[in-house]
Amino acid sequence: MEQNAWRILIVEDDVDLNNGIAFYFKSQGYKCLQAYDGRQALELFENNSVNLVILDVMMPVMDGHEVLRSLRSHSKVPIIMLTALSEERDKLDAFSGGCDDYLSKPFSLKELEARVQALITRTYQPEKKVVNDLVFGALSANSDLREISLNGKPLVLKRKEYELLYFLLCNPNRAFSREALIEKVWADSDINDYRTVDSHVKRLRKLLGRHGNYIQTVWGMGYKLALSEVERPQ
């Protein structure tokens, strides 16, 4: 992935500092999402593909430690914590919560960029060759990168779109009811509106273009992932 494809979520309630970080990183070729409180940060993360999070500690609504715990409950995305606090205890709390790096204010943007580059390189550009662990027709998936590609090009997927498509890739040619998909992918059997599954399938089919027919409707039941007739080996 080229540098200009890296997407950073900046979570900082100081508007001027948030905008300053975003302006700097955009000038270096990164894409930036901006949140000004913890709850907004989690919503943006849920609905966008994010490669790295720059996370302030002291924020309204939800503080950085709460956001960190929430992200770490389901994601290994690299996280750099920012704080005006410099006590050793605060740093230990951040690292024990799962952050990857810690930077005390005030800091230089060049130092922050260096830390971002180091984390991205370590996380997404390992020396070993990237091996896709699943291949299905034109689709390939790498679970380490949480990335699914179509004809070698990574798809931009929201979190549940990725998890739904990855689950189907792990279970090709097997039909699942909407209820089962809610339980397996959303891990929440209390969701009663199974149209949630339908809306995600509709979005995935659109993203897959002419390969959207990989996700087949099983009438009276739900969905399965299967190759079209012309792509099946003879």
Image (cartoon, rainbow, N blue to C red):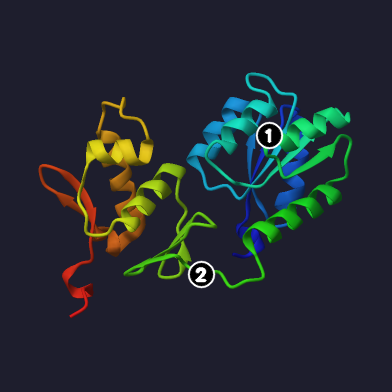
**Could you tell me which secondary element the residue under label 2 belongs to?**
loop
The answer, for residue 125, to whether it is visible in the render is yes
Left or right, residue 146 beside residue 129: left
Please give the name of the residue rendered at 63% of the width and 19% of the height, measured from the top-left corner: 61
Residue at point 31%, 53% (across, down): 168
Relative to 176, is 151 above or below? Answer: below
Above or below, comparing residue 112 to residue 214 in the picture: above
The residue pinned by badge 1 equals 97
Residue type at mark 2: give it: Val
Q: Residue at x 31, y 25 (%)?
A: 190
Work out whether residue 187 or residue 18 is closer to the camera in this orientation and state it: 187
Q: Residue 133: percent from the left, percent from the top?
A: 44, 65
Under tag 1, what secondary structure?
helix
Quadrant placement of the C terminus: bottom left
On the question of residue 37 being in view, the answer is no
Identify residue for label 2. 131
Q: Quadrant of residue 149?
A: bottom left
The quadrant the N terminus occupies is bottom right
Tell me residue 34's x, y (percent).
64, 37
Image spot of residue 145 (x, y percent) = 54, 57
Question: Residues under labels 2 and 1: Cα distance?
Answer: 30 Å
Q: Which of the pair 3/224 is nearer the observer?
A: 224
| Residue 182 disc label | none
